[in-house]
Image (cartoon, helix red, strand yellow):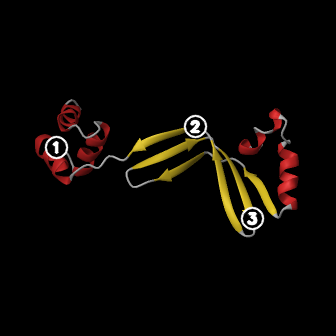
Amino acid sequence: MFPGLGGMGGRGGMSPKKMKGMLKNMGIGIDELEDVEEVIIRLKDREIVIENPAVAVMDAQGVRSYQISGVPRENVKLEIPETDIELVVAQTGVESEEARAALIEAKGDIAAAIMRLGTK
């Protein structure tokens, strides 16, 4: 139920239900968010995506904290320079958005993007 707390139950600790009751007595409410499909943490240069996460919300004196458990996967944000897009457009004759999409698909490799668009 509460991934961060549930691990204590099997090692002589208390059950998640007892832990929830104890926290409630201390003025800390804890609930689990239902039906969470994914959590995305956006950083300047990448994203951390956690699919099918377990999310617990703790409320202590009006301050809400979120505990997220799951398997993360990192996505590096790919910056495509405008000059690369223009070069692909000039070589293939496609629109800018199609050139950008081909560059993203090719992970920024200009030659691969041109080859992909040339074979369509």
Q: Compare marks 1 and 2 and give the one earlier in the sequence.
A: 2
Residue 60 bears which disc, if any?
3
Is label 1 in contact with label 2 (beta carbons under 8 Å)? Answer: no
Residue 58 place in picture, x, y as percent: 73, 58
Q: Taking 104 as reference, is 31 above or below it?
A: below
Q: Compare marks 3 and 2 and give the one earlier in the sequence.
A: 3
Nearer to us: label 1 or label 3: 3
Question: Disc 2 residue type?
Answer: Val
Q: Quadrant of the N terminus?
A: top right
Q: Nearer the viewer, residue 17 or 97?
A: 17
- Give left or right: position of 88 versus 28: left
At horizontal 21% and vertical 33% (from top left) the residue drawn is: 112
Return the residue found at the far bottom. Answer: 62
Question: Disc 1 residue type?
Answer: Val
Is label 3 in contact with label 2 (beta carbons under 8 Å)? Answer: no
Residue 83 place in picture, x, y as percent: 15, 51
Neighbor class of circle 3 (other Cα within 10 Å; few <14, some 14-19, many 20+) is: some
- Give left or right: position of 16 versus 107: right
Neighbor class of circle 2 (other Cα within 10 Å; few <14, some 14-19, many 20+) is: few
Q: CA distance from mark 3 to mark 2?
A: 27 Å
Quarter of the image for residue 120 reads top left
Q: Taking 102 as reference, is 41 above or below it?
A: below
Residue placed under numbered mark 1 in the picture: 88
Q: Taking 15 as reference, is 58 above or below it?
A: below
Return the residue found at the far front. Answer: 12
